[in-house]
Image (cartoon, rainbow, N blue to C red):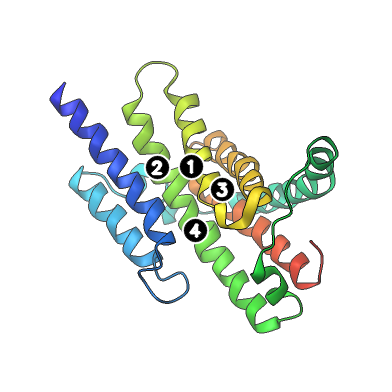
Amino acid sequence: MLTTFKSFVLTILAIGIVTIVPHTGIIPFPFGYVIPVLLFIWLYLKFNKENFQSIGFDFKTVSWKSFLIGAITGLLLFLFMVFVFFPLLKYAVHLPESRIDFYEQLKGNTAFYLFLVLMGWLVGGLYEEIVFHGFIFTCVEKLVPGKAKLPISFLFTNVVFALYHFQLGYDGVINALIAGSCYHVLILVHKRNLWYGIFCHAIFDTIALTALYWGYK
């Protein structure tokens, strides 16, 4: 019982660290939290005699298949969210309009756009999939007993992923919940290979950033 409680506390603390630190601004340059958070995850896994392969991330499993399936899914997901899901949602429910400053800064700003696309691949795709659908999901799954551990861990992970994007307003949180769940399903369907989610996430972000660059919201 004591060991189980200790594991629970350590897991919650670890999840708190990797989700809260990026929003504290303690590292005073854009996306500067990536390296320390990944280092923390590496140390946490090593302490538990595991590694990044244990959470589904392995350079040996990247393939053209993972890229193509991830890219096509990312494109279809974006089209669904923009032309089906959000129009229906906004028809049924009034959502407060969110004013996101960087959307206006991005419009027509080529240098900023290219920087954000790069970050969309390295941070949005690679980093966030490792942290959420790899690390957090795996940690939570180990805590939940019985047959319900997969759905409970899935739901918990993607709710946390959605709330992590609170700075993007109501639309951003809802978008992250639906899109994040799709990335996660793609990963699970392909034997927990994170590369499928990484490519899907990165392509989705790239298309979204390109639309914003051209002035579409």
The count of marks equals 4
Quadrant of the frame with the C terminus: bottom right
Considering only order in the chain, which callout, 1 or 3, is on the residue closer to the N terminus? 1
Q: CA distance from mark 1 to mark 2?
A: 9 Å
Please tell me whether mark 1 or mark 4 is closer to you in this view.
1
Residue 28 visible? The answer is yes
Give amino acid for label 4: Leu
Residue holding disc 4: 126
Few, some or many residues within 10 Å of mark 2 (<14, 14–19, 20+): many
Q: Quadrant of residue 187?
A: top right
Please tell me whether mark 3 or mark 1 is closer to you in this view.
1
Please tell me whether mark 4 or mark 2 is closer to you in this view.
2
Q: Quadrant of residue 203?
A: bottom right
In the shown orientation, is residue 124 left or right of residue 46? right
In the shown orientation, is residue 113 left or right of residue 28? right
Query: Do the CB atoms of the residues marked 1 and 4 lie less than 8 Å apart?
Result: no
Give amino acid for label 1: Val
Query: Do the CB atoms of the residues marked 1 and 2 lie less than 8 Å apart?
Result: yes
Mark identifier at residue 197: 3
Considering only order in the chain, which callout, 2 or 4, is on the residue closer to the N terminus? 4
Few, some or many residues within 10 Å of mark 3 (<14, 14–19, 20+): many
Q: CA distance from mark 3 to mark 1?
A: 17 Å
Few, some or many residues within 10 Å of mark 1 (<14, 14–19, 20+): some
Give amino acid for label 2: Ile
Tag 3 secondary structure: helix
- Residue 85: image x %, image y %? 78, 41
Q: CA distance from mark 4 to mark 2?
A: 14 Å
Q: Quadrant of residue 210?
A: bottom right
Considering only order in the chain, which callout, 2 or 1, is on the residue closer to the N terminus? 2
Tag 2 secondary structure: helix
Residue holding disc 1: 160
